[in-house]
Image (cartoon, rainbow, N blue to C red):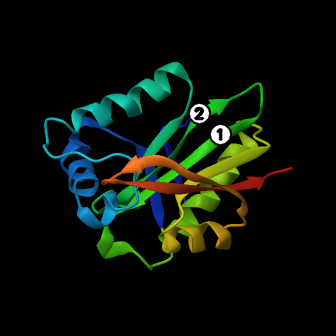
Amino acid sequence: MPSSILTERFLLRSFELSDLDNVFKGLSDPEVIKYYGVSYSTLKDTNAQMKWFKELEVNRTGQWWAICNKKNTVFFGGIGFNNFQSNHFSAELGLWLLPQFWGSGIMQEVVNSIMSFAISELKLHRMEAIVESENAQCIKGLEKSGFTFEGCRRECEFKNGKFIDLNIYAKIIN
């Protein structure tokens, strides 16, 4: 899998150990983790996320990229896929952005780029995203990128002292 992908405005590159501070900044931010399934309270704990990124690559079950400007001087967030199943031509999309960059069209551009990669390189037929039902901003972005609501897994996870619903969105590629 490629270590980097260029879009019109962004460089998507493999996560590096030097990204630890930025990953911690994102995955400890209350606004980011409000609807995200992973969070960290210390920089040291965030190493588990960095290890997970590498394991996906080594095991060929996914790939995640840091979203940066083309000069690689500004970090915006992360995007990737996991649960890649070559025998089913499917994977699960994930994405998070630092809050100061929300609403600037980043999501649609990078999702479309990942979808192009998934079609051309992985021959995927289906990409899905699992989203907390209250995450209206992410749902809007997925719909703009052509994902369709398939259903709701009602009260399937326990988070912050309550049961939450997860929506399944998918895009059929061919």
- Which residue is at 42% across, 24% downward? 55
Residue at 67%, 53% in the rendered image = 115
Which residue position is annotated with label 2?
83
Vertical position of residue 65 compared to residue 68: above or below: above
Graded by Cα atoms within 10 Å as few (under 14), some (14 to 19) or many (20 or more), the crowding at tag 2 reads: some
Type of the residue with mark 1: Ala
Image height check: is 24 above or below 108? Answer: above
Of residues 92 and 7, the one drawn nearer to the viewer in this rendering: 92
Question: Which residue is denoted by mark 1 in the rendering?
Answer: 91
Report whether 125 appears left or right of 115: right
Q: Position of residue 26 (x, y in %)?
A: 27, 57
Please name the residue shown 27% across and 31% down the image.
48
Q: Which quadrant of the figure contains the N terminus?
A: top right
Q: Is residue 79 left or right of residue 51?
A: right
Do the residues bearing badges 1 and 2 touch, measured as CB atoms within 8 Å?
Answer: yes
Q: Amino acid at mark 2?
A: Asn
Q: Earlier in the sequence, mark 1 or mark 2?
A: 2
Residue 154, quarter of the rendered image: bottom right
Q: Nearer the viewer, residue 13 or 164?
A: 164
How far apart are labels 1 and 2 at the CA level? 5 Å
The structure residue drawn at horizontal position 68% and vertical position 29%, both measured from the top left corner, is: 85
Mark 2 lies on a secondary structure that is strand
